[in-house]
Amino acid sequence: MGTLRHIGIDKLRLYPSTLSLSLSDLCEARGRDPETTIAHLMVRERTVLPPWEDTVTLAVNAAKGLLSDEERAQTELLIVGTETPVDLEKPVSSWVHRFLDLPSRCRNFDVQHACYSATAGLRMALSWLASPAGRGKRALVIGADASLVGIGEPYEYVLGAGAVALSLSSDPGFCRIDPAVGAVYACEVSDVIRPSRRIETGSSEESLFAYLEAVAGTVDAYVEQHGPTDWAHDFAGAVYHAPFAGITLRAHQTLLPDLSRAEARRDFEARSLPALVHHRRIGGMYGGSTFASLLGMVDARPELGPGDRLSIFAFGSGSCAELYPVELGPRVREVADAARATASIDARERIDVPRYEALERARDQAHDAPNHRPEREAWADHYTRMWAGQRRCMLEGVEGWMRSYAWS
């Protein structure tokens, strides 16, 4: 694999915003059994966005504080993966570039490919770092998304929001990734369709089948390209994209077809379930979910350390999937501790179902508003406690379709 193995993720951050909703409360409000629903979906909380938070602020707040001044000066590539842009022309990356004060020579753009977007950005950044153009430099990849409004819909329980920021370099502390090793499975399918910023439709059943077909497809492609692989023993853990946490068990059973369902379940609980520790409290994160699970795996399993290998499966509707290995780096524990993911998730303020519904309906209406000022009066206490003076990026308002952002 050569020296390319020394490229990878140096540092990362998970940003879960500042409000949360208990799935038990939501189930009771919808007349569903909380215990059964939570056990099946493996989600017990979800992030809810305050009125002044959107995809841009999620991306900026995830990366805020990640880079030192020297690292910022070395960053010459910024890629934002998202399927929930705030503008269909101007990329989210433009605002991120500005608010992170990145160099003017830093190339920046967005990638859209459903939940595969952040992984696509990662692979592009790795290739750039491996090239003469990227030698000795750094890349920043961010996955940021907020689910559309789904009040009363069957999939309401797995919605959420959040962002993950990855700083990549040729001296990675968190994990090493060889750009030459991995397998892709692509197949056109209309499982999920988003014809506007307010509408998401499609077939959840077809999406499930497409996801599981892609697991099998990437496994076959990986073995064809890299030889026989013992997924249960060659890797210390298995990380999966999680549109909802419960689907990862089905993915693991597909990865290990030679095991009985009971054996695969035991292996899943030991080597994969720990990765969902953050997911189960944030809900759907779209493109950032794979990396939230990667961080979650390290946070939840203190026995993991430098040199341990993990398999990662990424998927995006439409569809494209990828299966690749990572090797944990020399500073993996230090980086994970600095991310403080559990602390930021714990710090969110819990709201009840009526407040959640009011927030979501207002957010939905704001999508099509040429003039909009985020409601702050009704949320003054939350703003004072969690935002005022905290230097978080926030949406000030929209005037004539023009968005303005500022630090809190």
Image (cartoon, helix red, strand yellow):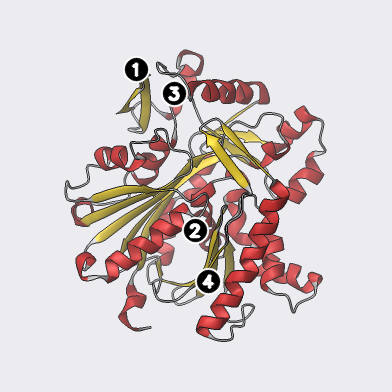
> Label 3 vs label 4: CA separation?
39 Å
Q: Amino acid at mark 2?
A: Leu
> Observer-nearest residue: 321 or 11?
321
Q: Vertical placement of 91 versus 288: above or below?
A: above
Q: Which residue is mark 2?
A: 295
Q: Nearer the viewer, mark 1 or mark 4?
A: 1
Q: Vertical placement of 375 versus 282: above or below?
A: above
Q: Nearer the viewer, mark 3 or mark 4?
A: 4
Residue 321: x and y, percent? 54, 62
Ranked by sequence position, the earlier of labels 3 and 1 is 3
> Label 1 vs label 4: CA separation?
47 Å
Ranked by sequence position, the earlier of labels 2 and 1 is 2
Which quarter of the picture shows residue 216?
bottom right
- Asked whether the viewer can see residue 170, the reply is no
Ranked by sequence position, the earlier of labels 2 and 3 is 2
Residue 330: x and y, percent? 38, 72
Q: Amino acid at mark 3?
A: Tyr
> Observer-nearest residue: 298 or 337?
298
Q: Identify the residue at image location x=33%, y=67%.
A: 127
> Label 2 vs label 3: CA separation?
28 Å
Contact between labelled residues 4 and 3, with CB atoms less than 8 Å apart: no
Residue 64: x and y, percent? 33, 43
Q: Is residue 219 left or right of residue 4?
A: right
Q: Identify the residue at image location x=75%, y=67%.
A: 265
Q: Nearer the viewer, mark 4 or mark 2?
A: 4
Q: Which residue is mark 1?
A: 399
Ranked by sequence position, the earlier of labels 1 and 4 is 4
Q: Amino acid at mark 4?
A: Leu
- Mark 4: few/some/many CA within 10 Å (<14, 14-19, 20+): many
Q: Amino acid at mark 1?
A: Glu
Q: Which residue is mark 3?
A: 383
